[in-house]
Structure formats: C-alpha cells, structure tokens
Amino acid sequence: MQKKILIAPSLLSADFANIERDIKRVEDAGADWLHIDVMDGHFVPNITVGPVVVKAISTVAKVPLDVHLMIENPERYIESFARAGSDFITFHIEATRDPQAIIRLIKKQGKGAGVSIKPGTAASAIKPLLDGVDLVLVMGVEPGFGGQGFIASALPKIEELRKIYQGNISVDGGINDANAGSVIKAGANVLVAGNYLFTSRDIKEAMRRLRI
C-alpha cells in the first residue's frame, strides 16, 4: 500500500528576513512538515542555524519540524535541538561512530529519530539501524548548499531501503516536479523541496505537482 506523500518545504530556501510569512505561505499551501537544515561549517562547508532559530520557528509553525543535523558530533546537540522544539531529529551516519547511542538519546528526548546518508554512502551503511529509527533521509545532492541538481543514483538506494523498511523515507536535494514521480515510485514518501517551492508563483499548485 502506497504511503501518503508528505511535503516538507526546506526553510533553507525561505526568506529569513520574512521567515514567519514564508512559513505561513507553505503551511497554507498544504505543507505537512517543515524541514530545517542545520550546518556547522565542518561536516559541510556552510553555516546555517542553531537551536535559537529553531526555537523561534517552533513558536510560529503549526506543522512538525523536521530538523536535519549536518554537523559533526551531533550527540552534543541533541538535547538542545529537542528543547528548541524539533519533532524529528535526523543525524548523518557519516558524522558519528556510535549511531545507536544517538538514536537512544533522541528517543530519550521523546523525539522522532532519523538517520541520513550522503550520495557517496551505500544504503547498507544504515541497515543495522532501521529497526530503531522513524525516518530515513536519502540525500539527492551533496549536503551543504541549496539549489543543486538531483543525483539519480539516489533512486536505487531508495528502492533498496523500501524493500526492507516500512517507515518514512525522505529525499532531500534537487526535488522538483520533473523527478518527484521517480522518487515516489522508488519508494520515498517524504519529499523535501526548497527552491522549487519558494520560487513558485503558486506554491499550492507546485506541491500538488510533487504529489502526483
């Protein structure tokens, strides 16, 4: 049975000077979650937001916050992001030596636990973790910057994971109406989209086109 397709607009592409307005725009258009990319300038070559900004977003958001930690030593910050209002906290398998400990820490905070893989990481790297997570995030681009083109090699990874995992499979990076169908067919049920949505004249119609 096909899972409901969820749309998680990536706030990396929002206007941070008008973040409350942009959150309302995508929520009114039917966003299911809001995706927040946290970058530290070490794990990826960019710096974005921290717990203070997530907390501010949580005070105006009406849908769950999907917080994606693209940072080194994520275990140091789980409690801070949990207190800030995250609903899902996703870390990268490449950023830790003890992923099980991080999953336990996220669960201890009462949050949904997610694990992510970069384009160069095989799906097999996270197979031992699947029983303990609520979300798997497959990167469709090299993490660090928005606006990149989707890497098609993510599709067989999604297919491989869906055969053995019944939870949420999210795809982040380069998602638009030209490739969403292939991503969904491969088995993903959560689409993270940034530039495609925030540059659309009609965000509601843009979301509709992602779901079909």
Image: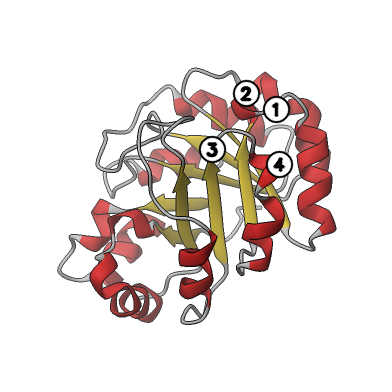
At 62% from the left and 59% from the top, the residue drawn is: 81
Above or below — where is 94 with respect to 144? above
Residue at the spot of label 2: 123
* Residue type, numbered disc 3: Ile
At 43% from the left and 70% from the top, the residue drawn is: 31
Q: Earlier in the sequence, mark 4 or mark 2?
A: 4
* Residue type, numbered disc 2: Ala
Circle 4 residues within 10 Å: few <14, some 14–19, many ≥20 = some
* Residue type, numbered disc 1: Ile
Give the label, 3 or 1, closer to the camera.
3
- Give the secondary structure at mark 2: helix
* Residue type, numbered disc 4: Glu
Residues marked 4 and 1 touching at CB (< 8 Å): no
Residues marked 1 and 2 touching at CB (< 8 Å): yes
Circle 2 residues within 10 Å: few <14, some 14–19, many ≥20 = some
Residue at the spot of label 3: 71
Question: What's the CA distance linking mark 1 and mark 2?
Answer: 6 Å
Residue at the spot of label 1: 126
Residue 54 locus on image (x, y percent): 50, 65
Determine whether, in the image, residue 177 is placed left or right of residue 3.
left
Question: What's the CA distance linking mark 3 and mark 1?
Answer: 18 Å
Residues marked 4 and 2 touching at CB (< 8 Å): no
Question: What's the CA distance linking mark 4 and mark 2?
Answer: 22 Å
Of 4 and 116, nearer the camera is 116
Residues marked 3 and 1 touching at CB (< 8 Å): no
Residue 137 locus on image (x, y percent): 56, 41
Q: Earlier in the sequence, mark 2 or mark 3?
A: 3
Q: Earlier in the sequence, mark 3 or mark 1?
A: 3
Residue at the spot of label 4: 75
